[in-house]
């Protein structure tokens, strides 16, 4: 999903993009090569949702290495666009979907685990069939705002940014 949003803005299809990106993806070289202006709006805490059969509730928090070998259900169109962009996880993806209901149903049935941000997890944390465990030491969960540096709407987009930042920090 993120790559399509980025490509849409780079290609001039969209004036502005918002996407959750890994921090290490947004390098000065990437920004320079793409011709984009990028700003991190905020970072969200990430959580692992897993059926109780995986026994993750014993942990106060998790690191990615502890879960990468488990089966994953991901919020993406296909494996190439998964947020984790981790070949160990990509090999363990059992379901890719844009349907949040289907994703959470798969977690509830124990088909796989998923990682979601805090604003989504709060809607699902009261289910007795699954565990919700914070994920620590991760670069996931950074929401970026971006537009083309050469956009004729640059000043308007910078004004929008100033308004957005009032609510993000």
Image (cartoon, rainbow, N blue to C red):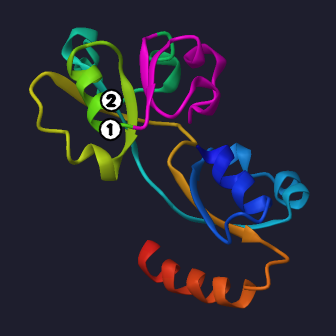
Q: Which residue sits at x=58%, y=24%?
A: 79
The spot of residue 41 in percent (x, y) is 55, 67
The spot of residue 117 in percent (x, y) is 39, 45
- 86 sits left or right of 10 in the view: left
The spot of residue 161 in percent (x, y) is 59, 80
Q: Is residue 75 magenta?
A: yes
- 9 sits left or right of 103 in the view: right
The reply to whether discs 2 and 1 touch (Cβ–Cβ < 8 Å) is yes
Near mark 1 (Cα within 10 A), the count class, few <14, some 14-19 or many ≥20, is few
Question: Which residue is denoted by mark 2 in the rendering?
Answer: 103
Q: Which residue sits at x=50%, y=79%?
A: 164
Question: Which residue is denoted by mark 1 in the rendering?
Answer: 100
**In this rendering, is residue 109 above or below 102?**
above
| Mark 2 secondary-structure assignment | helix
- 28 sits left or right of 78 in the view: right
Q: Which residues are magenta?
A: 70-98
């Amino acid at each position: 999903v993120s790559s399509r949003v980025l490509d849409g803005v780079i290609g001039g299809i969209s004036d502005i993009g918002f996407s959750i990106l890994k921090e290490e993806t947004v390098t000065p070289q990437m920004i320079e090569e793409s011709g984009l202006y990028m700003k991190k709006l905020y970072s969200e805490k990430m959580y692992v949702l897993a059926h109780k059969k995986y026994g993750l509730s014993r942990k106060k928090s998790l690191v990615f290495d502890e879960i990468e070998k488990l089966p994953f259900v991901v919020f993406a169109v296909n494996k190439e666009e998964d947020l984790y962009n981790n070949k160990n996880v990509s090999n363990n993806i059992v379901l890719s979907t844009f349907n949040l209901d289907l994703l959470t149903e798969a977690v509830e049935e124990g088909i796989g685990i998923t990682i979601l941000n805090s604003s989504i997890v709060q809607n699902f944390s009261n289910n007795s069939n699954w565990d919700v465990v914070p994920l620590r030491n991760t670069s996931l969960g950074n929401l970026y705002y971006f537009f083309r540096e050469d956009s004729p709407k640059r000043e308007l987009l910078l004004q929008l940014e100033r308004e957005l930042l009032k609510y993000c920090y």
